[in-house]
Amino acid sequence: MIEKNVFRISDARKRVIFVGFDGGGSNSRVIIQTSDGTIVRRDFPQSIKYIDIGVEASAQALKQMITETCSVDLWDKAYITISLSGASDELKNNEYKLQLSKIFFPNEVDCHIESDSSFTLKAAYRNGESGYVIISGTGSVAIARDVDGNISKVGGWGRLLGDEGSGYWIGLQALKHYAGASDGAVVKGKLFHLLKAQLDEISNGDFSVLRSKLYAHSLYPATFASLVFESAEDPSALSIIREGANHLARNILLLASRSENAIGNIVTLHGSVACNRLTVNYITEALPKQFMIRIISNDQVLFYARDCSRERDNLTT
């Protein structure tokens, strides 16, 4: 049962909380369970990727999210498990742990942090089974574990070098469509008009303002991905969705062809783009018939992170 801001913690032992965190390129999710089983979950419309804002700023932002969810006055020790987009640098992950210990002091912190791709793979195949995972939200990546436990990955290069089929990529294709339609190179359909209505509010119809905001990173292409799915009856929008899904399916085939060992036939999808009905259908069409598609939700990953925090407490008691 989920309750808001109600904590019944026994005074007979050190007050402990178990924190799960799942952070992507646009949104962050926190779940906290107290030692008596009370659970609080919150979503935050911001990204705290340290590859974008730095380790210290990311750790500070995480502290703010945790304290907004559960005051530091209500606990003495926190077991924290972090699944964070781009957190694949072991040195920076160690620095992150030190930062959290420093900024929460005198409260005690036991932290584990890793990239969302490897963590989602563990969440999808909890018993170490082989299988594939496609993550596509703001960014995109494909990762797999073979029958011998070897991990391989395709994609995850970031928005400038890759992330095909992601929300960023889809939004960028939509903006390119808008530019082409404005020049008369392509037909102005529903996608164009939805984009125009939103972009006019941002730039007052001045394309130079729009371009400047994009180059200054004050306007993010991923913002417009939802408009592509909203206008899916427009052939131009549907073409973008299909092309993106084909990129994601291609990455699964690349993983299969590169692996010396069997991976199996289960493909688990995660993320707002990957789990959209149209994307799921197109990925299914693009993959050979032997592949089976399933979905792992944000809550499943988040609760798995909470469970990992609880397990670390069990190992020390």
Image (cartoon, rainbow, N blue to C red):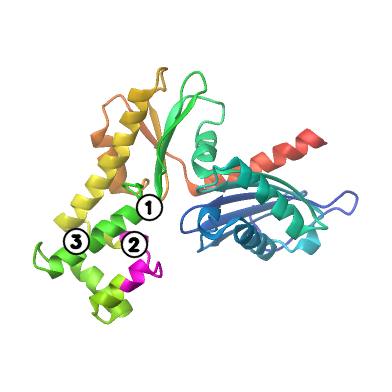
Secondary structure mostly seen in the magenta stretch: helix
The residue located at (25%, 63%) in the rendering is: 175
Relative height, residue 266 to residue 269 (above, below): above
Relative height, residue 187 to residue 135 (above, below): below
- Residue tagged by mark 1? 159
CB within 8 Å, label 2 to label 3: no
**Counting residues from the N terminus, which is met first, the one under dot 1 or under dot 3?**
1
Q: Quadrant of residue 178?
A: bottom left
> Which label was assigned to residue 221?
2
Question: Which secondary structure, mark 3?
Answer: helix
CB within 8 Å, label 2 to label 1: yes
Whether residue 55 sits left or right of residue 232 in the image: it is: right
How packed mark 1 is, by other alpha carbons closer than 10 Å (few <14, some 14-19, many 20 or more), is some
x, y (%) of residue 201? Answer: 31, 79
Magenta span of residues: 212-225
Three-letter code, disc 1: Arg
How packed mark 3 is, by other alpha carbons closer than 10 Å (few <14, some 14-19, many 20 or more), is many
CB within 8 Å, label 1 to label 3: no
> Which label was assigned to residue 177?
3
**Counting residues from the N terminus, which is met first, the one under dot 2 or under dot 3?**
3
